[in-house]
Image (cartoon, rainbow, N blue to C red):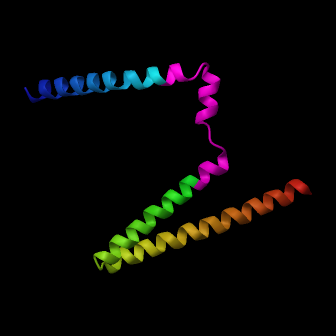
Amino acid sequence: MPQVTGIFFTKTLWNLFMDASQPVSNLIVHSFRTSAELKNRLMLSRSTLNRIIIIGFMVLVGFCLAKAIYHKSFMGITLALVSLAAVIYFLYILAKASEEREGEETA
C-alpha cells in the first residue's frame, strides 16, 4: 500500500510542476520570435561562464570558512583554507597554461 501512495504522490507532484511551468514556457515562446533569438539571449561567452563558476566557488569557500570560524572548528578552518589554496593554485596553473598556448599560437 505505501508504494501506491508514493506513485500517486509522484504523479500529483509531476502534474503540479507541469501545470506551473506552462505559463512561463508560453511567455518565453511569445517574447522571442525565433529560436535563434532565444539562443542568442541565453548564451554566455566562455570567459564569462568561467568567471561566474570561479566566483561562485570562491563564495562557497568563503561561506564555509566563515561558518567554520563561527563554530570555532579547527578542522573546518583547515579544510576551507586548503580548498582556498587549491583554487588559487588552479587559477595560477590555468593562467600559465593559457600563456603557453598563446606563445605556441604566435610562434
Quarter of the figure with residue 62:
bottom left
Q: Is residue 55 magenta?
A: no
Q: In the orientation shown, which residue stands out farthest toward the right?
A: 107
Where is residue 8 shown, x and y percent of the image? 17, 23
Quarter of the figure with residue 17:
top left
Quarter of the figure with residue 2:
top left
Given residues 94 and 38, the one toward you in this image is 38
Where is residue 101 shown, x and y percent of the image? 79, 57
Residue at 16% x, 29% y is 6
Where is residue 58 shown, x and y percent of the image? 50, 64
Q: In the orientation shown, which residue stands out farthest toward the front?
A: 31
Q: Which residues are magenta?
A: 28-51
Residue at 48% x, 69% y is 83
Name the image quarter holding the N terminus: top left
Residue at 34% x, 77% y is 69
Residue at 46% x, 62% y is 59
Name the image quarter holding the C terminus: bottom right
